Amino acid sequence: MNRTKLFILTLILASVFAVSCSVLNNPLKINDYALIHTDQGVFIIGLYEGTPLHKEIFLENICSGIYDSCLVYSIIPNGLMKAGLPEDITEEAILQENFTEKTIQPEINEKLINKTGAVGMLRLADEKNADRLSDTKLFYLVQGINLDEKTLKTLEAKRNAPIIADYLTIYLNKPENQIYKDSLDYYKIEGQNKNWSRLYADLTENIIPEIEKDGKKLFKINKYQTEMYQSIGGAPVYDGQYTVFGEIVEGIEIFQKFSEIKTGLNNKPKKNIYILSTEKLTKKEYKNLK
């Protein structure tokens, strides 16, 4: 290989490396957009560079018109709005069918969270989908609410409660820890809730190293999440569970219109909300729209 070719190859590799580092350092970067027309108004989704698999599948859906005439089919107050379902088909049927045919590997990132306006891909529940593989079609929009630090700590504790309870049961059933079990039982019977909570918290600290030793991660709301959920709101209980691949960059007021429609069983709107059409936008086209 002559020096000129070697120089060109070096430049190409350096460019690829620089782009890769940029995405890793800033997974929130947006270069592509999706324009969504509904019968309640229009909104635009910016698609994250940090989730390339989900971005490409979503853009394929947009360009092929898959979402045309589909529904915004579930509205959970102050939570999620689910979209992309054709009429006369159930969510479970779509998720199950796609799971056996095609799914997307998870691209979960601690910087890509379920803040208000976030867009994520739905999936089958953990019982059938332990690897948290995403569906290729159904997606959700996060409405959420603003949360104070105390509420965030409570949510964190609730997410971790099942795994902590399992480990604590094993810990308390060991003969050498019988005194702690007896104390918890006593406090509970006597209604000494503060003493019970204090001892339970102390014992939890004792078993956390065992949980981590087994390679299991407890749910932790970090500083970035705390700041975002306090300032703009969201639904932190879904963090780490679903892949968030974009966010609404224009038309977030559409949430208000959706929320005004009454819902029935399974949070289904009593009046259908239709996605009329969708369109892919480049960064230049998006800026021209603004």
Image (cartoon, helix red, strand yellow):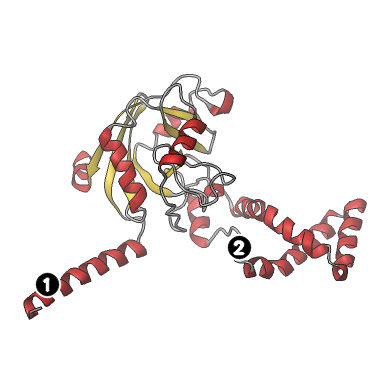
Residue at horizontal 7%, vertical 76%?
4
Question: What residue does disc 1 label?
Answer: 8
The CA distance from mark 2 to mark 1 is: 46 Å
Judged left or right of residue 273, residue 129 is right
Depth check, front residue: 191 or 203: 203
Residue 1 picture location, percent across and down:
10, 78
Depth check, front residue: 149 or 111: 111
Q: Quadrant of the C terminus?
A: top left
Amino acid type, callout 1: Ile
Judged left or right of residue 205, residue 90 is left
In which quarter of the view is residue 43 placed?
top left
Q: What secondary structure is marked by label 2?
A: loop
Depth check, front residue: 232 or 86: 86
Total numbered circles: 2
Residue at horizontal 68%, vertical 69%?
210
Q: In this picture, is 141 found above or below 193?
A: above
Which residue extends farthest front? 100
Residue at horizontal 43%, vertical 41%?
135
Residue 161 picture location, percent across and down:
69, 54
Question: What residue does disc 2 label?
Answer: 216
In which quarter of the view is residue 250 placed?
top left
Amino acid type, callout 2: Lys
Judged left or right of residue 108, residue 154 is right
Of the two numbered discs 2 and 1 on the same chain, state the one appearing first in sequence. 1
| Proximity of marks 2 and 1: CB atoms separated by less than 8 Å | no
Structural crowding at the residue carrying mark 1, measured as other residues with C-alpha within 10 Å and reported as few (<14), some (14–19) or many (≥20): few
Q: What secondary structure is marked by label 1?
A: helix
Residue 63 picture location, percent across and down:
25, 37
Residue 87 picture location, percent across and down:
42, 22
Q: In this picture, is 38 found above or below 197?
A: above
